[in-house]
Amino acid sequence: MKKTIAFIMAVLMLGLTLAGCSGDGSGGKAKDTVTVLGTVSTDSFNPFSSSIMEDWVKFALFDRLIRFDENGGYQPMLAESWTEESDGLTITLNLRRGMKSHDGEEINADDVIFSIDTMFSVPNYYYLATYMASWEKVDDYTVKIVKGGAYCETLNLLVTSIPVVSKEAYERLGAEGFGAAPVGTGPYTFSEKGADGTVTLKAYAEYWDGKPAFETLKVKAPIDISTAVVALQNGEIDVMIGVPSAQWNTVKSEDKLVLDTTVGWGAMTLGFMNGMKDDVNLRKAIYHGINRQSAITVATEGTAVEARDIYSARTMKELAGTFDVPGYDAELAKDYLAKSNYVAGTPLRITVSGADQVAVAQSIQNDMNQIGINIQIEQVDMNAFSSMLQNGELDLFLSQMGLATVATIDMLFYWESDNPLWGPQIAHDAEYDELCRQMRVETDHEKLMELAHRAMEIQYGLANHLGIYETVNSVAHSKDISGIYAIDAAAFAYNPGLLKPAN
């Protein structure tokens, strides 16, 4: 009897001991640190520098005017509201009052204008002028922006690419000093950068949206993917962006982890250039000879979504699904091949620059073998790929096309004859070029969409490129964390201030 009572007491004592402990050694205290895995190592904390800066760090330190919600819609950030005028070009943004930078200074329209001016002065960001023709202060809490064209995704640009800084702090510290000791406007303040590249940030108590739920945010320098997944399983990191599809089942098998995925603005695309540009029948033979589902199975383990248009549905918006897109038809492919100038056995080179592209190329190679076309795969690094594109050395190539900031019409401009890079390398149509000229100046949305629709029809006829599948973006995180969404990974625009304990 005594032994029985002793045993029961021992079990009770053990239970009490375990109840007072937690797996992370916090002694039952609420988790106050969240660790995310970066994709690059930060060289400078100046968001306007051409030096490398990890996006998690940038968006923790600096807010934008607006942000994406979990579905890719727009939500207020530094701007509490905005209106788009009927001219299709003008956006008026109304700023919050009482917002403070990390040094306690109020943020107003002067800081927004200064931030845009500074961003646009950096040579590496020359392309931003495509989206914003002008910007001006209306009053201390109102900013007006004129878009580069009615078609431009300028709101997306404000989400992803225009961090807001304190004008006074930036001018006081100078670009270099600011890069070493940033004064931000975001939910976290800079603390330190470790020898291993890990950046530590602290919650900003005066943040306009309330102090962040986690006192400390650690952004680890990138590590090998396999090592990263193990670190996620072990709880060494809480959030990981871009988990390879081959690792999805591993993540899903862990009860303590969540995997969130979404299609984004990108699509795996096959392009036809140079040696392919003068034979439309050969291009169409390849078009109809590719089994998209096979490519999806091989390259993404069946996780991707078949591209129903040239570009992703997010990029196409209201134009998505309005076309009778050429599909897989091996017999039709053979008919086009018979009308082409292709000489049996002649190798056609397809150039790729990434592992996922190699897998797609291998699937295409197998499909082409079935209809009598000899495909050779050439794999190069990204620098070499860019050089080959610049020098007109690509024939068939695979690339992921599409970003949050790029509209369908932006993409269509790539294929006009006046394009200094792509133009000389592809097949053309005079009507298409005229449509591009009209789209640049048209402000009526309905008419703009009519022009774009016709331009897309011509591109399908020219068969300059083929959308294979929409790229799937992923994020894995601890079940103890909420406020992180796959759309953030798709846009490369994160919201660290939304991170909080799940319960």
Image: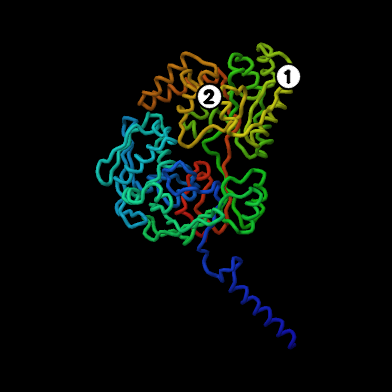
Q: Nearer the viewer, mark 2 or mark 1?
A: 1
Q: Quadrant of residue 181?
A: bottom left
Q: Amino acid at mark 1?
A: Gly
Q: Indicate how the structure is coloured in the image.
A: rainbow
Mark 2 and mark 1 in contact? Answer it, CB < 8 Å: no
User: Farthest bottom residue?
Assistant: 2
Q: As rendered, which of 286 and 15 lies closer to the eye? A: 286
> Which residue bears the numbered disc 2?
323
Q: Position of residue 477 (x, y in %)?
A: 57, 53
Q: Position of residue 389 (x, y in %)?
A: 56, 26
Q: Quadrant of the N terminus?
A: bottom right
Mark 2–mark 1 Cα distance, whole angstroms, equals 29 Å
> Which residue bears the numbered disc 1?
372
Q: As rendered, which of 300 and 381 lies closer to the eye? A: 381
Q: Amino acid at mark 2?
A: Phe
What is the secondary structure assignment of the residue under circle 2?
A: loop
Q: Position of residue 41 (x, y in %)?
A: 53, 48
Query: Of label 2 and label 1, which has the lower sequence position?
Result: 2
Instruction: Tell whether 140 sits left or right of 499.
Output: left
Q: Quadrant of residue 376?
A: top right
What number is the disc on residue 381?
none
Q: Residues within 10 Å of mark 2 (few under 14, many from 20)?
A: some
Q: Residues within 10 Å of mark 1 (few under 14, many from 20)?
A: some
Q: Is residue 55 above or below residue 15?
A: above
Instruction: Tell whether 140 sits left or right of 370.
Output: left
Instruction: Tell whether 143 sits left or right of 324.
Output: left
Give the residue displayed 69% in from the left and 21% down from the top: 330
